[in-house]
Image: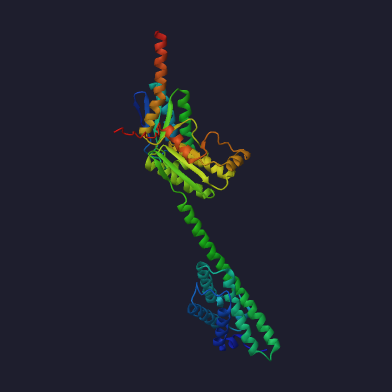
Amino acid sequence: MGTDIAKLLQKKQKRILENWMTSQLSNISLREDLMSNDDLREQSAEFLDTLLKVLTEKNLSNVESSDFEPVHELLAGVSLSRAKQGFTPAETGVYIFSLKDALLTSLQTDLKDDQAGLLDAIIKIGRLMDYLCVIAFETFIKGREEVILRQSDEISEISTPVIRVWDGILALPIIGTLDSSRTQVVMENLLQEIVESGSTIAILDISGVAAVDSLVAQHLIKTVAATRLMGAECIISGIRPEIAQTVVHLGIDLSNIVTKATLASALKHAFGMLKLNVKRVETVKSGL
Amino acid sequence: MDRIPILRMGRLLLVTIQIDLYDRLATNLETDLVQMVNKTEAKGVLIDISALSIVDSFMGRILGNIGSMSKIMDAETVVVGMQPAVAITLIELGLELKGVHTALNVERGMELLKEKIGNYDEDLSDEDEDSTE
């Protein structure tokens, strides 16, 4: 055979880059809103340059060779930044596969007369590019997961406000699903606020909780018990009919917890416990 | 040996735990307290644990025990000033301190005790009146 695929490609680097860019720019999935063409060209040129620099005849058949580490790093960086910028997986896939196309086209023209060499080169390049693609996807998904993780952190942080509705009465509207970690946050926030404000009554409003299962109920019962230990009373409000149904069907006993249908009735109950009275002020019409 | 001081205030006993309890100290407190309830005929026990930051299942049980023991000796127990972390730990350990009353701070605890004992006093005076009549 004797054809050095790596050398062949390195010689044609410029043309490959042009081909690659053309196919990337002509692809319908091009996202000019997320990345300008100049940036894309710069990124592509750097990647191709790094790839061809480390590529030798020897490591071409060994895709897991440590020679490719700089390529992997660069690719991971590209993939990660694409995940964060909001590219779709398909668009990231096109980025790698269009390079594969460009490389293969170049080889095809160069090895026109050497069918066996061409086949060998295609298989090797194909294997290498597929491996790179796997890496790109892995980091892409990792990047996405980071984004999701950060968002869920943010949600759990902002979605557990403790509101002082009255002197000595706290309200805590819970929105979304209650899992162990969120219950922990809710409980800590609530107990801390009870200490700081010296409140004696806390109202847990669960009208924003989509579904209550035995685990969620368990968490609620724990929160109520912890509040009681602190020396405050806890009222659960916002029990919707569906929730009442599931709770009873699951055989969860909420009978030793004060439960109310709405936040308003819970507040009324709290007023009663604090011996407060809300009265409408009679407007006295002056006769003069 | 270290002991937790138990202060007498009228018909109430006051215990302020200022240091982290180790097991021996806790069992001593339990013994001392029931002795004291017996001796002074106290009607209420107020335990301030606001300085307690570490609690384990043993300590939780001792607190519960003190409550139950006082209860059968006719004294109400109020635990006041529990730290949020302590409350969470006790709940996670499954100790809900059923026989014990709780309050946010000493002031509220006193009010609660007075309310409980006050009722008792009224009952007592009612009975006295009845008997004198």
Residue A249, position as x, y percentages in the image: 63, 39
Please give the name of the residue rendered at 48% of the width and 77% of the height, measured from the top-left corner: A39
**Is residue B10 placed above or below A212 in the rendered structure?**
above
Left or right: A19 in relation to A114: left
Q: Position of residue A5 (x, y in %)?
A: 62, 86
User: What is the quadrant of residue A163 in the picture?
Assistant: top left
Q: Residue furthest left?
A: A288
**Residue situated furthest front in the rendering:** A288
Of residues A106 and A155, which is closer to you in this image?
A: A155
Query: Can I make out residue B54 in this image?
Result: no
Residue A284: quarter of image: top left
Identify the residue shown where x is 60% and y is 82%.
A102
Q: How many marks?
A: 0
Identify the image quadrant of the C terminus of chain A.
top left
> What residue occupies the far bottom of the structure in this picture?
A113
Q: Position of residue B75 (x, y in %)?
A: 43, 24
Give the quadrant of residue A88. bottom right
Q: Is residue A288 above or below residue A105?
A: above
A57 or A165, nearer to the observer:
A165
Q: Nearer the viewer, residue A284 or B78?
A: A284
Residue drawn at point x = 63 percent, y = 85 percent: A105
Residue occupying the far top of the picture: B133
